[in-house]
Amino acid sequence: MSKIQKAFENNKAFISFLTAGDPTLDKTEEFILSLAAAGSDIIEIGIPFSDPIAEGEVIQRANIRALADGTTTDKIFEMVKRVRLKTQVPLVFLTYINPIFVYGIEKFMKNCQQCGINGLVIPDLPFEEKAEIFGIATHYNVDVITMIAPTSQDRIQALANNAAGFIYLVSSMGVTGVRSEIKTDIDAIIKDIRQVSSTPIAVGFGISTAKQAQELAKIADGVIVGSAIVKIIEQYGENAGTYLFEYVKSMKSAMI
């Protein structure tokens, strides 16, 4: 069992997301520790990219701020090494396939292992083209997280089979961003997934309130929150740490 799967063993998992380098890498390190202290069971770290096609405007702006501050993949790896000296919370990179190819697949996976990254979410990695990435990632003990969308109905069995870490169930069509209401029949999709896989299922995209987290925790194994957290960082900048702690603490409490 991987370190990511162990995060789901005892209770429902709360998964936090933030963008590396927003507003600075030093602050990202501080914010990760705040998120962990508040009860985050897994933390996703977005690698800023110029064309984050799965992201809404909140996270797009975070990518722009991080890139403008000179954030690079190598600097993120160094930051994660420092984080690993202070917390053992599972860490997952969210990135796109282009940065991995440009960096070099094997070099990227090796560095993930060396600095303590446990998994990867790659929104634009086609299922049919996953073999090369999966093989190298597995060699370096990095889980490549399977994403399942509301439109994946006919492919759920293929997608869910042999899923690693957890299954990232996308709650709504479109890009990331806070939504006041989630209309997708999440319960039905989860039931279909459970027929073919025992891998933990976490729901993301659009979740921002304690009520949403509480309701989804009744049917899923975990909840993923990104834009709401990034919005706090956008609002409070370098002083966001305390606000992040209180927000995550309240979300985690709602799921128990």
Image (cartoon, grey):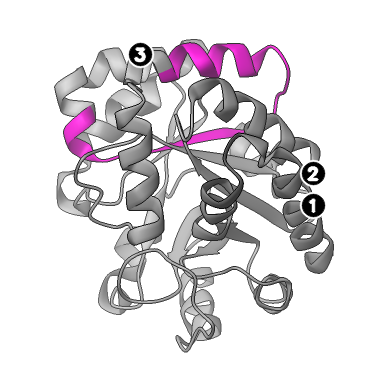
What segment carries the magenta color? Answer: 76-99
Placement of the C terminus among the 4 image quadrants: bottom right
Q: Which mark is residue 209?
A: none
- What amino acid does circle 1 point to? Glu
Q: Is residue 37 left or right of residue 235?
A: right
Q: Secondary structure at mark 1?
A: helix
Q: Nearer the viewer, mark 2 or mark 1?
A: 1
Labels 2 and 1 touching (C-beta < 8 A): yes
Q: Between residues 99 and 247, which one lies in front from this camera angle?
A: 247
User: Which residue is located at x 45 percent, y 85 percent?
Assistant: 184
**Which residue was labeled with disc 2?**
38
Q: Which of the two discs, 3 and 1, labels the residue nearer the N terminus?
A: 3
Query: Residue 33: x, y in percent?
Result: 70, 30
Q: Which of the two discs, 2 and 1, labels the residue nearer the N terminus?
A: 2
Report how far apart the C-alphas of labels 2 and 3 lie in the structure: 28 Å
**Residue 36 visible in rendering:** yes
Labels 3 and 1 touching (C-beta < 8 A): no
User: Crowding near pointer 3: few (<14 within 10 Å), some, many (20+)?
Assistant: few
Placement of the N terminus among the 4 image quadrants: top right
- What amino acid does circle 2 point to? Ala
Query: Residue 168: x, y in percent?
Result: 46, 58
Q: Is residue 98 located in the magenta-colored stretch of the structure?
A: yes
**Which residue was labeled with disc 1?**
246
Query: Residue 209: x, y in percent?
Result: 66, 72
Report how far apart the C-alphas of labels 2 and 1 lie in the structure: 7 Å
Q: Is residue 187 located in the magenta-colored stretch of the structure?
A: no
Q: Residue 25, relative to residue 216: is it above or below?
A: above
**Which residue was labeled with disc 3?**
74
